Amino acid sequence: MAIELNEVAIIYDDSLSKYDFGKMHPLKPERLKLTFELLRSIGYLEKPNISVFNPKVAKEEELVLFHSESYIETVKKYSDIGSGLLDSGDTPAFKECFESTCIIVGASLKALELVADGKTHHAFNMSGGLHHAFKNRASGFCIFNDPAICIEFLKKEYDMERILYLDIDAHHGDGVMYGFYSDSTVLDIDFHEDGNHLFPGTGFVYELGKDKAKGLKINFPLPPGTGDTQYIRGFRELVPALIDKFKPEIMLMQCGADSHYDDRLTHLNLSTNMYSEVANTIHKLAHKYCNGKLIMFGGGGYNLFNVSRCWTVILNEIIDEKSNIDVPNSWRILYKKIVGEPIPTHLYDEEMPSDEIDDRIIDEVTKNIEYFKSNIL
Ligand SMILES: [Zn+2]
Ligand SMILES: [Zn+2]
């Protein structure tokens, strides 16, 4: 039977929540359960075009596709001890951090296999998108870089030569970008808050890639306060044209929910409208260029309500379903129990924050668009 255009696999079970840096850490594992339960409460898990798969556990031979053996050994050692720091301060080791990261990477590889083998068009691992991890070190709450491992896996096991990686997390996806900086098989497009204002402090327009990959690393830094209008303008002007030029065989998208205006660690002014627009565009482009092959990862997101709804809004676009605009009461009760805070009643933001009156933001975005138009397109 032919797979449907709006078919999506969700990779999930509770074991993904074992990736837990502790109570005081901003990356909360509860966000995964809350998102999954929100999808259940609006009836998505019963839909014929949505299937849920358990993650597999990544093997060391898969980790070494991107990471060095010595770094993997270091993580294992700290994982056994259950304490210490894996980077300069943001990423503490915890008991079994090795094993729990292997489940997250395994979930992304499961998503990859389902899509690359043609069993489904689209797959989503909400626990993935650990885009800051480097070959030799952890960074920014990321121990192993699951999108980077997926890219290497697609190259090695599926002989893919044109892979799109799109990253809409508020933070620059430095681990992926620098990991493939000289690699012409990867078109990396990354919209993020300007590195002059936010961790990791990288991802500037002039970082275009090296050697044969020059022109294939597109970093679009956004000034703090950038809202939907200017973001979407930059996205529409560049992304479809870049993709048309590159003609990817498969698309990977890191869907960090921390670009939302109500995130606690970042300073952009974006609403659910941006997530809808990006997902809608990428979904159409995935069908146009890649026979639908689209793998989605979660990413950052430090306001638990926003994480759940941004990712639900993305799925709405993928399955072409926009009717569920009210948050079910059963889920609101669960949220209150887990998070202890009252939440809005609607999935979509009612009032879109506007950036149309800020000349500084308009000028910066215009400058970026012009830069890529004259240097790349
Ligand atoms: Zn589709
Ligand atoms: Zn982030």
Image (spheres, rainbow, N blue to C red):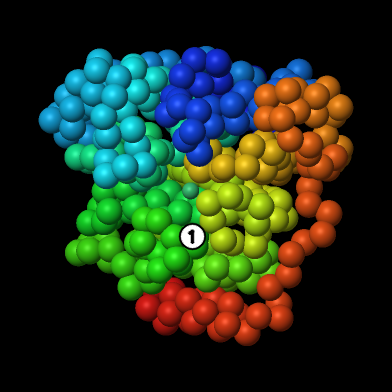
Q: Going 53% across and 51% down the picture, which residue do you hit?
A: 265
Question: For this view, does 355 lie left or right of residue 350?
Answer: left
Q: Nearer the viewer, residue 342 or 324?
A: 342
On the image, the x and y values in percent for residue 193 come to 49, 62
Identified by mark 1, the residue type is His
Q: Is mark 1 within 8 Å of ligand 2?
A: no
* Rendered view: 130 above or below 353: above
Q: Is residue 322 at all visible to an observer of this figure? A: no
* Rendered view: 335 above or below 278: above
Q: Is residue 180 at all visible to an observer of this figure? A: yes
On the image, the x and y values in percent for residue 310 come to 67, 43
Task: Sort mark 1 into few (<14), some (14-19) or many (20+) by Cα contacts within 10 Å.
Answer: many
Residue with the mark numbered 1: 192
Callout 1: SS:
strand
**Quarter occupied by residue 314:** top right
On the image, the x and y values in percent for residue 376 come to 39, 73
Q: Nearer the viewer, residue 191 or 152?
A: 191
Which quarter of the rendering shows the N terminus? top right
**Quarter occupied by residue 66:** top left
* Rendered view: 211 above or below 132: below
Q: Nearer the viewer, residue 364 or 45?
A: 364
Q: Going 40% across and 68% down the picture, which residue do you hit?
A: 196
Q: Going 54% across and 76% down the picture, which residue do you hit?
A: 365
Q: Nearer the viewer, residue 326 or 75?
A: 75
On the image, the x and y values in percent for residue 45 come to 72, 20
Spot the residue most to the front: 24
